[in-house]
Amino acid sequence: MHIDIISAVPELLDSFFLHSIVQRASEKQIATVRIIALRDYALLNKQRQIDDYPYGGGAGMVLRIEPVYNCIAALKQERAYDEVIYTSPDGEPLTQRRCNQLSTLQNIIILCGHYKGIDERIREHLITREISIGDYVMSGGELAAAVISDSIIRLIPGVLGDEQSALSDSFQDDLIAPPVYTRPAAFNTWTVPDVLLSGHAADIEQWRMAQSIERTRLRRPHLLKK
């Protein structure tokens, strides 16, 4: 998989991708993430301006269409993209099911929102999918792009040391994962459930399923309705 992230402030992403599961995927040559500086594609003025005041007035600045168009057009000269994603608060919610689907793709562009937003013509003509990581607003879409990248790359076979780890994550089967424990079996007066120490695989699996269902009922009851 290859992901190109277009950002107005690419420096915000450097640390994350140098110290994460994404870096491991890159070292294994399974997936790569490239950070693209949007300002490099602002060609109409010497100041490399990428934003401007909104038509009709109002507070905030808006990302201009020209540098975004130039950037995406240049990237498409290199490869064909399966999706051009825009990180937007009003996009479709990022769910595990969507992460699973995205992890099967080969090439993705992620455009980070910034300022007050982007020229609507970008959304109408250049974007193929809009994704939100929650019903709130951040200063920019860089963190959202990092979340999206991490959540889909970790699902690609070979990225994690144990491929079963991703398959047993919360939400993979519309259930929250059960509680987990490790050594020591007793700490102060807190102990590990006896069933996990029993060595009886069927009983352990039954316990884990019951715990998943109960946690989902308490914390995400809408998932059980599916």
Image: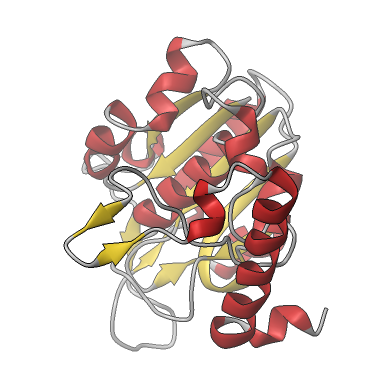
In the image, what residue occupies the spot 49% across and 21% down?
A: 25
How many marks can you see?
A: 0
Q: Can I make out residue 196 in this image? A: yes
Q: Nearer the viewer, residue 53 or 188?
A: 188
Q: Is residue 118 above or below residue 86?
A: below
Q: Is residue 157 above or below residue 135?
A: above
Q: Is residue 190 left or right of residue 168?
A: left
The quadrant holding residue 7 is: top left
The quadrant holding residue 36 is: top left
Display coloring: secondary structure
Which residue is the extreme one toward the left?
Answer: 188
In what quadrant of the picture does the N terminus appear?
top right
Q: Is residue 187 above or below residue 45?
A: below
In the image, what residue occupies the spot 35% across and 54% down?
A: 143
The quadrant holding residue 174 is: bottom right
In the image, what residue occupies the spot 44% across and 58% down?
A: 64
Q: Is residue 200 left or right of residue 145?
A: right
| Residue 221 position in % (x across, y down) | 66, 86
| Residue 13 position in % (x across, y down) | 29, 40
Q: Nearer the viewer, residue 112 or 72?
A: 112
In the image, what residue occupies the spot 80% across and 85% down?
A: 225
| Residue 205 position in % (x across, y down) | 70, 53
Q: Can I make out residue 155 in this image? A: no
In what quadrant of the picture does the C terminus appear?
bottom right
